[in-house]
């Protein structure tokens, strides 16, 4: 179902209004809602390495494809999800979050406004600080 949803977004995204993108991503970002994590540790690990990981790459793929159409305010939501993934104990998901962040910046960075660059650098700093080992 996720694959089909993201394929529809990638196929028809150029016809979406900014309000529609906002509503759509409000639904999509709920995939990462902590309250929906499975109860058992095994289910949680499986969910993080399958559904969550797949959704993360697909979200960044859509963001890079439609960067100019998606409202800039949604970048904060994207960065929030990426930070959440990077800070998980699940190494696969944490690496995926880092890779997705890097891909997004490399692909879209040349189109960032100074304000988006400030938010991007702030996000990098937050990720760096939150992943430093405690002394």
Image (cartoon, rainbow, N blue to C red):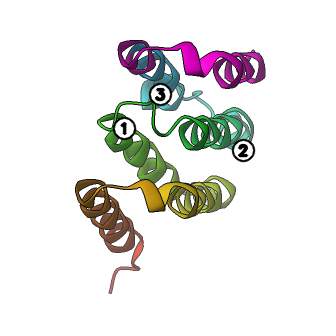
107 versus 13 height, above or below = below
Q: Which mark is residue 35?
A: none
Type of secondary structure dominating the magenta stretch: helix
Judge by depth and name the residue closer to the eye, 52 or 114: 114
User: In terms of sequence position, does the residue under pointer 1 or pointer 3 come before the other?
Assistant: 3
Residue highlighted by disc 3: 29
Dot 3 crowding, Cα within 10 Å, few <14, some 14–19, many 20+? some
Which residue appears at 75% of the width and 14% of the height?
1
Pinpoint residue 89: horizontal percent, then vertical percent: 55, 57
User: In terms of sequence position, does the residue under pointer 3 or pointer 2 come before the other?
Assistant: 3
Q: Which mark is residue 49?
A: 2
Which residue appears at 46% of the width and 23% of the height?
25
Secondary structure of the residue carrying tag 1 is helix
Report how far apart the C-alphas of labels 1 and 3 lie in the structure. Answer: 8 Å
Which residue appears at 32% of the width and 43% of the height?
76
Report how far apart the C-alphas of labels 3 and 2 lie in the structure. Answer: 17 Å
Judge by depth and name the residue closer to the eye, 114 or 126: 114
Dot 1 crowding, Cα within 10 Å, few <14, some 14–19, many 20+? some
Q: Are marks 1 and 3 in contact (CB under 8 Å)?
A: yes
The answer to whether residue 56 is seen in the rendering is yes
Pinpoint residue 38: horizontal percent, then vertical percent: 59, 27
Q: Quadrant of the C terminus?
A: bottom left
Q: Which dot, 2 or 1, sits closer to the camera?
A: 1
Magenta stretch?
A: 1-22
62 versus 36 height, above or below = below
Residue highlighted by disc 1: 77
The answer to whether residue 88 is seen in the rendering is no
In the displayed structure image, the side of residue 32 where residue 19 appears, left or right: left
User: In terms of sequence position, does the residue under pointer 2 or pointer 1 come before the other?
Assistant: 2
Which residue appears at 68% of the width and 24% of the height?
6
3 versus 95 height, above or below = above
Secondary structure of the residue carrying tag 3 is helix
């Amino acid at each position: 179902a996720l694959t089909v949803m993201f394929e529809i977004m990638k196929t028809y995204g150029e016809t979406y209004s900014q309000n529609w993108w906002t509503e759509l991503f409000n639904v999509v970002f709920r995939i990462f809602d902590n309250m929906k994590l499975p109860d058992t540790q095994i289910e949680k690990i499986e969910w993080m390495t399958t559904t969550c990981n797949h959704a993360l790459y697909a979200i960044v793929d859509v963001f890079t494809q439609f960067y100019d159409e998606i409202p800039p305010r949604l970048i904060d939501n994207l960065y929030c999800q990426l930070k959440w993934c990077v800070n998980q104990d699940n190494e696969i998901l944490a690496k995926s979050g880092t890779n997705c962040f890097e891909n997004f910046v490399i692909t879209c960075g040349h189109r960032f406004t100074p304000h988006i660059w400030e938010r991007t650098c702030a996000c990098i700093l937050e990720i760096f600080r939150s992943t430093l080992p405690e002394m």
